[in-house]
Structure formats: structure tokens, C-alpha cells
Amino acid sequence: KILFSNFDVTWLSENQKFDFSFSFNSRNIKALRFSYNNFKEKENFKEKILQIFGLIGDNYDIVSLKKILDLMSKTDEKHQTTIGLEWLFGQSFPRIKVYFEELFHIYSKVERIRIIRDICNLLDFEYSSLKLGQKPSIGAFCIDFLPNRVKNLKVYLLTQKLFQKPSN
């Protein structure tokens, strides 16, 4: 009822917006993974993420999540947001991941650095501890929300051009 309200099933033919998988060794399942993104579904996506968090209860820092979603909602219509869940074998609670992707298409390098600095401030992380260097080329970032209100920040850097014009 959360994910598929206002969901247009024809979008599946244009993009893999919903992914569900298992990781396992030869004997048993080791992890369950699920992800869902806002490709062509910008309206109410933030509310869906908050409802998913609400299902699990007070074990996760929903206050920080709301602040991050508010910060990033200024350009929601342009970048891709993905919520993922990873439940490892033997763990009592899953990791909930929120990715902000395709940032390099709409933000300058300076703006992407500013965003990561703002995210660090919201999460009470020290920006310098990321050791990104002078002018990092940030492509995406992810916040892992773990039980007991623990959070991790992952920043993904671009190391080469993704698209090149053919040479003559």
C-alpha cells in the first residue's frame, strides 16, 4: 500500500525502479536486498520513504532522515533518490539506505561539495574525516541508517568521464 499507491506499472518498461534480490552461498540465504527509486515518480516519494521508516519504529533516526530529505527536496525533480533495504542473515534489524544519485548532471562540483558539507552538518559528522581531497568529483552519496540511530555516510566519486563525444 505504501510503494504502489499512485504507481504507474508502465514505468517498469522504461526503468528498473523496483529491485528485489537474495544473496546466498551454497547452503542458505545470507541477505535480502530491496530497492525502489523515484524515476518518474517525484510526487509523494518523500512521504513513501518516511512511511517505510515508520514501519520499523523508533530504532532508526527518522529526524535526521527528514532533515536530509528536506535539504535534497529542493531539486527532487532532477536527481534520482533510491531507498534500499539490506537485511543480513543473523541480524535483528535491516540497514536502510537512502541514495541520492545522478548529482553530477545537475550540480556543479562546488554545489556538490556544499551539499556534502551540509549533510555532514546535519549528521554531526566531520567533513574532513571523509578525506575527499581538494576538489572531489562527487557523483552520488548514500546514508546508511542502522539500528540504534547509527548512521554512516558514503560518498561515491566519479573517476572518469561517463560520456564522451566521438572524435572526428
Image (tube, rainbow, N blue to C red):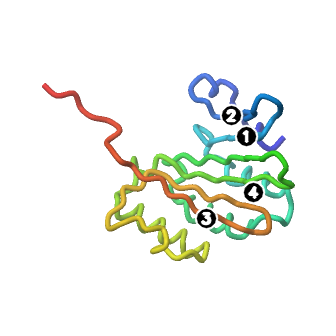
Sequence-first disc among 3 and 1: 1
Viewer-side label of 3, 1: 1
Category of crowding for the residue at label 2, using alpha-carbon neighbours closer than 10 angstroms: few (below 14), some (14–19), many (at least 20): few
Nearest the viewer among 7 and 31 is 31
Name the disc covering residue 91, or none: none
Q: Are marks 1 and 2 in contact (CB under 8 Å)?
A: yes
Viewer-side label of 4, 2: 2
Q: Is residue 84 left or right of residue 110?
A: right
Name the disc covering residue 68, or none: 3
Task: Name the residue at 62% across, 28% down.
Answer: 11
* Residue that numbered label 4 is attached to: 50
Image quadrant in which you'd find residue 164: top left
Q: Position of residue 136 (x, y in %)?
A: 36, 60
* Mark 4 residue element: helix
Q: How far apart are labels 3 and 1 at the CA level?
A: 23 Å
* Residue that numbered label 2 is attached to: 19
* Residue that numbered label 1 is attached to: 33
Image quadrant in which you'd find residue 12: top right
